Image: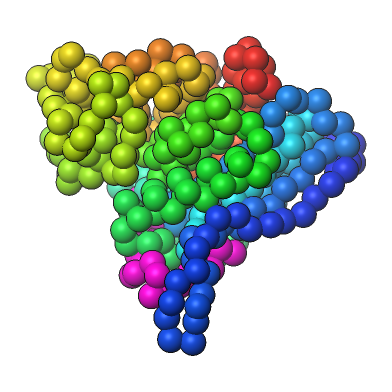
Amino acid sequence: MTIKPPLEIAEQGYFFVGGKYFDAPGGPFLAGHMYVEFQIPKNLTRPYPLVLFAGGGQSGLNYTGTPDGRDGWVQYYLRQGFAVYVLDQPARARSPYQADAYGPTTRFGVERVQWQFVAPERFNLWPQAKHHTQWPGTPDPGDPVFDQFMAQQYPSLESFPKQQELNRDAGAALLDKIGPAVLFTHSQSGTFGWLVADARPERVKAIVAMEPSGPPVHDLVTKGAPDWFEDGPYVKPYGLTAPPLTYDPPLSDPSELKFVKQAKADAPDLTPCWEQAEPARKLKNLADIPVLVVMAEASYHAAYDHCTVRYMRQAGMMKTTFIKLADIGITGNAHMLMLEKNNLDIAAVAEKWMREAGVG
């Protein structure tokens, strides 16, 4: 067993950013604010801090450890010399929920957590699910690792557009406070990265997007063999997001974006992609930001993350790198990359990319 040297922290703490007061009986109350905790290592060697957004139903706990007690990405990146800021989305976990400001919530039950996150191989809803091997426990209630993961599932706002607006505003307020940073996003929070970067392009030095919210334009429904996929609701009128992004030529209304669907998918285990009709408008505030998109072998994202990358590049985001983990020998992962058995191998992939991109 390898004994790691002590992790030396020069400074740590927490604060809230963003938010506005609203009137309600017994008020005013504050809403829209976001909880942030930070750690700065004694050996601070990297030029920009990392800002870590968790995905749907999750919190900053995704990054501060794993359900079976191993180091998380926070510990890994602190040891690599990065300052780290970990967030709880507005209206979730330590960012208090205000029902009369935010509206109703939804939540993940055991079966959804199993098929989407920890045991997709049991359900076979997408072709790649059978490759999953990396969950660090038995994916059933009563297993201590599974129970720890279920314990950290949080209700989410029912309105995904509202979540995007809240996280855009709070994320921009965070960058106004701490200065330039690298954004880490996962899943649902992928939309937040595009929106925060669009609002503060000069302060976002790079985006590491772990299986970001997708595919573009329409959600995807995974339904099993033989047809596997069908288009879901039209949820991203700005291509990658529901709230506005800055396009060139400018838009006066999102209906001016015209979308077309691939006639045939790139491979039998992939879904056809939605993209802009040519000539494509460009996402001008995002064009100069280096982006890394990481995709796992067995995740439901394996059917469509290429569509997200395709859309980004068509819209002028040519500094986008796409890494399929299986192509570099990291296999068996589902969607919860930061919690699975080989989580630090995946963290190292992003660290290498940041170094080579000049932002880490």
How far from the left and from the top, in percent, is residue 9?
86, 43
Q: In which quarter of the image is residue 360?
A: top right
Which residue is located at x 26 percent, y 33 percent?
239
The foreground one among 130 and 62 is: 62
Which residue is located at x 31 percent, y 39 percent?
244
* Residue 77 position (above or below residue 106): above
The foreground one among 53 and 118 is: 53
Which residue is located at x 38 percent, y 21 percent?
284
How far from the left and from the top, in percent, is residue 279?
18, 14
Res 348 seen here: yes
User: Outermost residue toward the bottom?
Assistant: 26
Where are the magenta residues, as a range? 94-115
How far from the left and from the top, in percent, is residue 87?
59, 51
How far from the left and from the top, in percent, is residue 290?
51, 19
Res 7 seen here: no
Does the magenta portion include 68? no
* Residue 144 position (above or below residue 213): below
Q: Quadrant of residue 6?
A: top right
Which residue is located at x 75 percent, y 25 percent?
46
Q: Quadrant of residue 50?
A: top right
The N terminus is located in which quarter?
top right
Position of 266 compared to 181: left or right? Answer: left
The foreground one among 168 and 312 is: 168
* Residue 233 position (above or below residue 127): below
Position of 128 compared to 88: left or right? Answer: left
Q: How is the image coloured?
A: rainbow
